[in-house]
Amino acid sequence: RCFREYLGVPHALSVTSGTVALEIAIRLLDLNDGDEVIATPQTYKASVQPLLNYPVKVRFCDVEPNTLNLDPGHFASLITSRTKAVILVHYGGLPCDMDAIMPIARRHGITVIEDCAHALGADYRGRKPGALADIGCFSFHSSKNITTLGEGGMIT
């Protein structure tokens, strides 16, 4: 309850790891053969590895050179009629340009998954990562901002 209230989201579910949070988020997409998912190459493999279990095409989006986050302009150019989702990473805890990304995604009916593994405690224009898009995924691995002394995760 405290996590949900901190982020200001209606739901937060604890899971065994950030990877499991991402796996659940991707499962919720109900992907079909030939669907496309846009992702960032600037990440740990767990952000996109669950996509390998589906017959989908992963399209990697360029990153902005000064933030290493998903480039909204390149994101827009990758969208096709088969694009179902985008998985973005708030790299190094720095939130992506969500005010640019979300209108593009909404216009095309694309689900946005936030990988917030390093973004707990970050702020984006008065809002918190994990509450900026459709689904947020957090990791509490021992290398993250907050840890459960090993593994753990949250999906919002």
Image: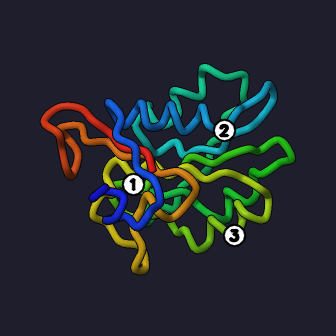
| Residue 95, placed above or below residue 34 | below
Q: Judge depth for marks 3 and 1 and give the one in front.
A: 3
Q: For the residue labelled by badge 2, is the local secondary structure a helix, a strand or a loop? A: loop
Q: For the residue labelled by badge 3, is the local secondary structure a helix, a strand or a loop? A: helix
Q: Residues within 10 Å of mark 3 (few under 14, many from 20)?
A: few
Which residue in the structure is indicated by mark 1?
91
In this view, the residue in front, 74 or 108, is 108
| Residue 36, placed above or below residue 156 | above
Q: Which mark is residue 36?
A: none
Q: Amino acid at mark 3?
A: Pro
Separation of marks 1 and 2 at Cα, in angstroms: 23 Å
Q: Judge depth for marks 1 and 2 and give the one in front.
A: 2
Separation of marks 3 and 1 at Cα, in angstroms: 21 Å
In the rendered structure, the answer to whether residue 20 lies left or right of residue 135 reads left
Q: Residues within 10 Å of mark 2 (few under 14, many from 20)?
A: some
User: For the view shown, which residue lies furthest in the front direction?
Assistant: 1
Q: Where in the figure is residue 59, as x and y percent of width and height? A: 68, 40
**Residue positioned 58% across, 35% down in the render:** 26
Q: Where in the figure is residue 65, as x and y percent of width and height? A: 48, 61
| Residue 148, placed above or below residue 66 | above
The quarter of the image holding the N terminus is: bottom left
Separation of marks 2 and 3 at Cα, in angstroms: 19 Å
In this view, the residue in front, 136 or 10, is 10
Disc 3 and disc 1 in contact, CB within 8 angstroms: no
Specify the color scheme.
rainbow
Q: Judge depth for marks 2 and 3 and give the one in front.
A: 2
Q: Amino acid at mark 2?
A: Leu
Q: Which mark is residue 29?
A: 2
Q: Where in the figure is residue 133, as x and y percent of width and height? A: 55, 60
Q: Earlier in the sequence, mark 1 or mark 2?
A: 2
Which residue in the structure is indicated by mark 3?
103
Q: For the residue labelled by badge 1, is the local secondary structure a helix, a strand or a loop? A: helix
